[in-house]
Amino acid sequence: MEGVGDAGSRRRKYMGLVSALVLLVVVIVVCLNSSMVSSMQQATTAQWSLAALTTSNSTDLQPNSSGLSANHLAVNRADSPAAPTAPRRLAYMLYATDARTVCNALIMAHNIRATGTPMSIPIVTLVASDVALDIAKQLVDPFNNFVVEVVAPWQQSRVHLSHEYVSSLTKLRIFEERGGFDKVIYLDSDAWVQRNLDHLFHLGNAVLWAPHAYYIRESYVFGSTLLVFSPSNDVVAALAAALETPPRPNYFDMDVLNDLFRLDCGYLPNHYVVLSYTLNDNYTWSFKTKEDRMASTYVYHYSPWLGVGKPWQTPRSILNDKDQAYEPLYYDLYARYWQQEDTLCTSWLK
């Protein structure tokens, strides 16, 4: 028979074991709760990150209801791929109001292509609607991406209909928004392009860019043989308003353009367009020699002087009686025009 002392000892051991088991259960429960809370926090963070990424990648950013900061959204948006931008639409542009200027435009279009302008850039000629269809179609050439746009003639109201330049204001329709073009290089067709002009498509913003008219004494005057611009109907409206009451009869495209924009335009250096009769002058401008200037000239504009007119007004016999004081290039420019006229225009030009 056990004594009272032995029974008490066993009871104390039993109670100690129970206490240890209870403590172990408490520890296990605490650990499990901590693990679950951590997992829930991670899941919540992951869900919020996914929501932020989805929101930042959406086309229209919704109000920030996720509780994340705007900076977080901005970072995610910056990391997402940028939307592709549409390529700019570029074009060369010419104009024609009769059979002769159609021939000139055709020569110029081939001249531009010969300098290396890619076929992806169209050469668009604005042809007055009173030009015969069989003449205008000479400028249509899908292979070379030559395009014709028929436009209404724009006539100067203070000159007679027989005036040589009565329809020359038709040129100003180049500024009309057509074809979705972002940037246009315009050229007068009574000129010869020596060097490629495609780099002018990358000029910055200005109402227009044009070469300084070095042959006029006034400092701020530009020539309109070469123009670079983004089409704008606002510009057309300003031109039309200024031409409602022209200040004098001989008021044409270069006059109105300068009156409106000579203090706002961008000026190209002198050597971008040189008048043919000044080719022989000793101008050097920013070049070391006259020869450097001639080699750097982009466009020569056929300009009447001392009995020599435009190529179609000048007898070809001048090539047989050259003035030795003149640069050979002066006569070469006329010879080049006549060669192209024979190739491109003789069969239909009357």
Image (spheres, rainbow, N blue to C red):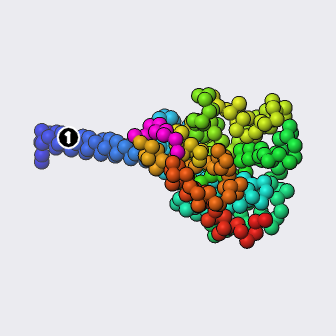
What secondary structure do most residues of the magenta stretch adopt?
A: loop
Instruction: Name above or below for residue 146 compared with residue 181.
Output: below
| Point 76% across, 39% down: residue | 252
Q: In this view of the protein, which residue sits in the foreground, 293 or 68?
A: 293
Q: In this view of the protein, which residue sits in the foreground, 32 or 313?
A: 313
| Point 20% across, 40% down: residue | 16
Q: Quadrant of the C terminus?
A: bottom right
- Whether residue 129 is visible: yes
> From the viewer's perspective, is 349 left or right of 143?
right
Decide whether residue 43 is among the magenta residues.
Answer: no
Q: Amino acid at mark 1?
A: Gly
Residue bearing mark 1: 16
Q: Secondary structure at mark 1?
A: helix
Residue 306 at x, y percent in the picture: 64, 44
Location of residue 107 (image quadrant) = bottom right
Residue range highlighted in magenta: 280-288
> From the viewer's perspective, is 54 left or right of 306?
left
Location of residue 113 (image quadrant) = bottom right
User: Which residue in the rendered view is the most extreme toward the bottom?
Assistant: 347
| Point 55% across, 62% down: residue | 114
Q: In this view of the protein, which residue sits in the foreground, 183 or 98?
A: 98
